[in-house]
Amino acid sequence: MFDGLSERLASTAQKIRGQGRLTEANIEDALRDVRRALLEADVALAVVRSFIDEVKQRALGKEVLTSLKPGQVFISIVQQELVKVMGEQNEQLNLAAQPPAVILMAGLQGAGKTTTVAKLSKLLQEREKKSTLVVSCDIYRPAAIEQLKTLAAQVGAEFFPSSVDQKPTDIAKAALEYARNHHIDVVLVDTAGRLHIDAEMMAEIKQVHAAVNPIETLFVVDSMTGQDAANTAHAFDEALPLTGVILTKTDGDARGGAALSIRQITGKPIKFMGSGEKIDALEPFHPDRVASRILDMGDVLSLVEEVQAKVDHSKAEKLAKKLKKGKSFDFNDLKEQFEQMQNMGGMSGLIDKMPGMGGMADKIKDQVNDREIRRMIAIVNSMTPKERKFPDIIKGSRKRRIAQGCGLQVQDVNRLMKQQLQMKKMMKKMKGGGMAKMMQGMKGKMPPGMGGPGGMGF
């Protein structure tokens, strides 16, 4: 997300940082670049105008013109204004209600409501330690009810059955009663979507809302619709008392116009952003962290939180002990590293959160995408247990068999073997002088086939 905007703003930042001092003329040039970048990112025109006015007013003040590092101060102002536009801070869900707390999900068809219900249910179970019940009031699409049932089983949520011959309000009331009787903490209600906003749809969702009186009414919107997302959110907000927005498909949106427009147009906070189909690909929306990503400053806090939540620490400890004893880093270990990376949203998800990766991100993503990681895992899966443990025995005939077993080429097997060898050498350095030595050895090295430093670099 924000790839195009990040590139343009990073370029503007570079130019203005190079200025010895800032004048009204070169601030105007920078603002022109920022304005163009925002419009190209499909940010609503009204939002762009007020954003530029705010930055200009502050940039022409003493704070910048008298600063010893005016370029840095200017970029800092842009960052602060981006944060302000998106909502200052993350606004958490309000679950302070007599259980069950009800969360109603609204939105157009195809926005990803049903998947988001499951993702949010998983997040509430893992981070808030809440028991959850999910129910579908979409009586127009039997497939939606079945989809939610399947997803509920995947995330460990309880599923309340419904059918197309019931009334949406009756379904919602029955689910709420069931949750009360079974002491469930949170009920997530999935509602019917339409291809466009219509009076019938709005009347129905108002009735469901009145029937369950939710503590949170969240609007789920596809970020790829750009500023249209903000306009649709505004229309829903006029019909329902929305408490927040969930942006979906942010991994497919290179512009970011929706994220920068919604708060200003609707006055409602973006509470979560979803990326990809994976059931855990939902994260709280932190305006300050997103602003840092836009300006290519990375998002180290989210990266650390992700590592803490998703890395299997027992496996990491086991590997550390193994290396400390002087044992070799084999293909079983390499496969584990790949799987840990997949759990964290793949290489592209990590790169997006690393500072200073704006210019490199696309090149690295081309080399190390999730498809490439899956291919690497397939090669390891094609090996015998002995070959995984003792990579040195893999010679010509074994390479051919492994390549045939996973439907790839011998060159692919060779590339992975080279990768494993490089990782093995670096892991040896860990034993002698810890992680610092390993990082020193990795500096500037980009092995073929894997764009990041020293392959995985974990």
Image (cartoon, grey):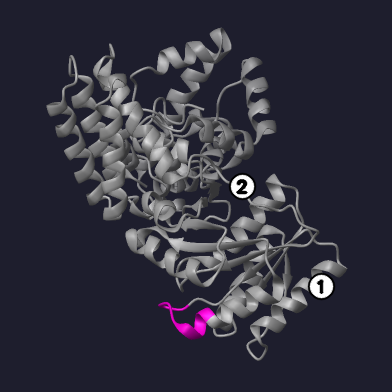
Residue 398 can be seen in this image: no
Q: Secondary structure at mark 2?
A: loop
Coordinates of residue 290 in the picture (x, y in percent) = 43, 40
Q: Which residue is mark 2?
A: 92
> Residue 71: x percent and y percent?
25, 21
Q: Is residue 200 magenta?
A: yes
* x and y percentages locating residue 117 in the rendered image: 60, 63
Residue drawn at (47%, 83%), measured in percent from left and top? 199
Residue 70, x across and y down, in percent: 26, 18
125 sits to left or right of 117: right
Q: Residue at x 21, y 32 (%)?
A: 12
Q: Residue at x 86, y 66 (%)?
A: 182
Q: Nearer the viewer, mark 2 or mark 1?
A: 2
Give the residue type at disc 2.
Gln
Q: Please name whichever residue, 116 or 381, is drawn nearer the observer in this view of the structure.
A: 116
- The residue that disc 1 covers is 178
Q: Residue 372 got which mark? A: none
Kind of residue at disc 1: Tyr
